[in-house]
Amino acid sequence: MTVGILASPLVFNRFSATPELAAVTLVAELALMLVLFIDASLIDLKVLRDAPSKIPTRLLLIGLPLTMLLGTGVGVLMFDSISIWAILLMALILSPTDAALGQAVVKSEDVPNRIRQSISVESGLNDGIALPPILFCLAILGADSDGHSGDWINYLIKQVTLGPVVGLAVGYVGGKLIEQMSGLGWMEETFQRLSVLPLAILAYAIAETVGGNGFISAFSAGIGLRLGATTVQIRHRMQEFGETEGTQLILIVFLLFGLALVPALFPYWGWQELGYAVASLTILRMIPVAISLIGAKLDWQSIAFIGWFGPRGIASVLYLLMALAAIGFVGNEQFMSVIVLTVAISVYAHGISAVSLSKRYGQNRPTDY
C-alpha cells in the first residue's frame, strides 16, 4: 500500500490509475472469489461448536451484527448529507475484519491458542456473512440511481438463491471429481492445488450467467468443496495453495489501493471522516466485542486484545470496489472516502502494533490460557 501511495500522484507521480480501471476491478474480483472460496472451505462447524466458551460464535453472531448496527447509528448522527442506505452500506463494508493484516497475531506463539483461533475464525467467516446485506444495500442504491425502485426485490431474490445453489453444486461435484481422479492416480498433487482458482471462477461465472451472485456462489462453492472432497490431505493441499494464491492477489490489491483509491478519495478527507474512521477501529469494534464476550470467562486484557485486533483490509477494499462498479463514484465520494481512510489507518495502526502488543499480551496473560 505504501509503495502504491509513493508511486501515485500524491507523492512522486510515477504512475496514475483510477478505481474504475478494468485491471483494478479484474484483480479485485479474482481476489474476492478466491478469498471467499478458501474461507468457506475452511469452515469447520465442529470448531465453532466445541470452541472454549464459543468465542468465535459469539463474535460472529453477536459482535458482528452489533458492529453493523452501532456503525450505522453513529454514521446517521455524524453525516447529515449521506443517505441512510449509503451509511448502512458504509457500516457493513467496514464490519468484516482482515485475516491477512492479522497474520502476525494469528501466528504468534505469544498469544494463547484459543485467542488466536478465535480471531482467525472470526476474520475468516465475517466477510462471507457480511456479503448478503451488502448486496441488499447495493440493490436498493443501484435501483434508486437507475430509477427502477421496484426491480431490486426480484434482483436480490435471484442473487441470493441462485448463487448458493450453483456454488454448492460446482464445489461438491468439483471436489468429488478431484478426489476420485486423485484416487485413480489420474491427477497428481500439483494439479490438485491448481484446481482451486478455476473452481472459484467456474462457480462465479455460472452463477452470473443464470442471474445469481457470483461472489455468493464462490463462497458456497467452498462449502461444497468441503462436502465433496472428504479426503483431508487432498483438501489441505488445495486450501494451502489457494491461500498462497489469495495472498499474492491480496498484495496486488493493496498496491492498487494505494495507487488508485487513496489518491482519488484523499481530497474528501476531513475531520468528520477522520473521526468516524478512528471510531470504527476503536469503539465501534471494541464495544460490540466486549458485549458479545460477556459470560465467556475472559479477562479484560483478552477482551481488549480481541477488540483491538479487528483490522479492516482486503474485504472492505473489495466490497468498496464492488460498490464502485454497482453505484458509481459520483455522489458517493464522502462515504467511500471514509472507507478508504479507515482501511489506510488500519493497515498502519494494526500492522505496526501487531508484534509488540502480541508479545506484551503474552507476557501478561493468565497462566491457565
Image (tube, grey):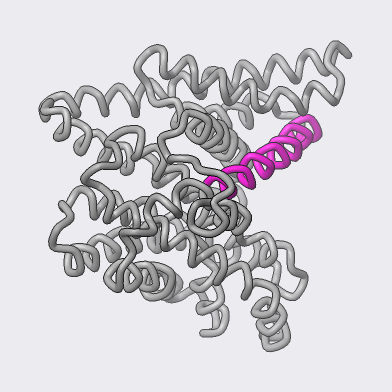
Query: What percent of the width, then of the height, locates residue 184?
Result: 85, 12
Q: Judge whether residue 220 can be spotted in this image.
A: no
Give the dominant element type of the magenta stretch: helix, strand or loop: helix
Q: Looking at the image, is 275 positioned above or below residue 24?
A: below
Q: Judge whether residue 125 can be spotted in this image.
A: yes
Q: Residue at x 41, y 40 (%)?
A: 321
Query: What percent of the width, then of the height, locates residue 64?
Result: 39, 58
Relative placement, left or right, of 142 versus 284 is left
Quarter of the image for residue 120 reads bottom right
Query: What percent of the width, then of the height, locates residue 359?
Result: 72, 80
Query: What percent of the width, then of the height, locates residue 247?
Result: 67, 44
Relative placement, left or right, of 133 versus 247 is left
Between 189 and 356, the residue placed more toward the observer is 356
Quarter of the image for residue 213 reads top left
Q: Residue at x 51, y 79 (%)?
A: 304
Between 178 and 241, the residue placed more toward the observer is 241
What span is colored magenta in the figure? Answer: 232-256
Q: Looking at the image, is 311 positioned above or below residue 149?
A: below
Assess whether residue 235 is covered by the magenta stretch.
Answer: yes
Quadrant showing the C terminus: bottom right
